[in-house]
Image (cartoon, grey):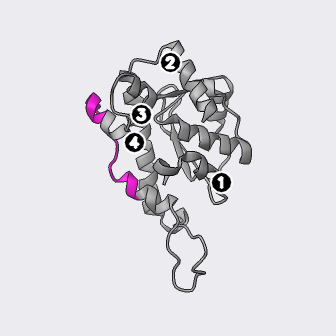
Amino acid sequence: DLKRRGAAVYFECPHFRPLLASYRIRRGPMRRWRHGEPCPADLRAAIEEGLIVSAHNAAFEIGVLRWLAANAGWPSIPLTQFRCTAATAAAMALPRSLGDLGAALGLDVQKDKEGAALIRFFCMPRKPRDGEDPNGVYWNEPEDYPEKFERFHLYCDRDVDTEAAADDKLVPLSADEQELWVIDQEIN
């Protein structure tokens, strides 16, 4: 339960592995990555040139990208290179959840409400099936559910578009607020 336990426990779990990612560089075309693939060359170049990474609840992306840097040869990204649209929304007294923020801002693109079920399906352990060790940890594997996994990636694409639309409408944090956000990330 990420809300109750925090994301750090999630990333420290020996079963953790990022399954997919969607991203845009400078509002360019949607790009995708899936588990087992190397860091995309365009993303590596953008990270290494210092491009700002904007994400909603950026602490999650920070955790994923740190894991990828430590375990899959991705470049490390300093915290100063991140911006968090959830923190920016909070500073403007707007909702922190992406769905509520999109509605409050009247965005043309809104968060996909079916995504939560797909997250539970692919990212939480499932119950053991007949013949499996009842004490084992089992997952719904993407290759066993290709159509459903594609819907999961479409959900991720939609989040990227919703986050970008929100980012375009929000007033950025001041330099002092951004510095405090970075300090908070370092502490936590």
- Residue drawn at point x = 58 percent, y = 81 percent: 132
Q: Earlier in the sequence, mark 3 or mark 4?
A: 4
Vertically, is 95 above or below 119? above
- Residue range highlighted in magenta: 102-117
Vertically, is 52 above or below 57? above
Determine which residue is flagged by label 1.
36
Q: How far from the left and from the top, in percent, is residue 55?
A: 49, 33
Q: How far from the left and from the top, in percent, is residue 59?
A: 55, 37
- Disc 4 or disc 2, which is closer to the eye? 2
Circle 1 — which element? loop
Q: Earlier in the sequence, mark 2 or mark 3?
A: 3
- Disc 3 or disc 1, which is closer to the eye? 3
Circle 3 — which element? helix
Pointer 1 local density, CA inside 10 Å: few below 14, some 14–19, many at least 20:
few
Determine which residue is flagged by label 3.
163
Q: Is residue 13 visible?
A: yes
**In terms of depth relative to the viewer, which is nearer, 9 or 109?**
9
Q: Could you give the CA–CA distance between mark 2 and mark 3, rounded to whole angstroms?
A: 20 Å
Amino acid type, callout 4: Arg
- Kindly give the residue lying farthest to the bottom in the view shown: 131
Q: How far from the left and from the top, in percent, is residue 123?
A: 51, 58
Q: Which mark is residue 158?
A: 4
Q: Which mark is residue 103?
A: none
- Specify whether 123 is left or right of 133: left
Q: Could you give the CA–CA distance between mark 4 and mark 2, rounded to whole angstroms?
A: 28 Å
Amino acid type, callout 2: Glu
Determine which residue is flagged by label 2.
177
Q: Could you give the CA–CA distance between mark 2 and mark 1, rounded to whole angstroms?
A: 37 Å
As for residue 47 lying within the magenta part, the answer is no
Circle 4 — which element? helix
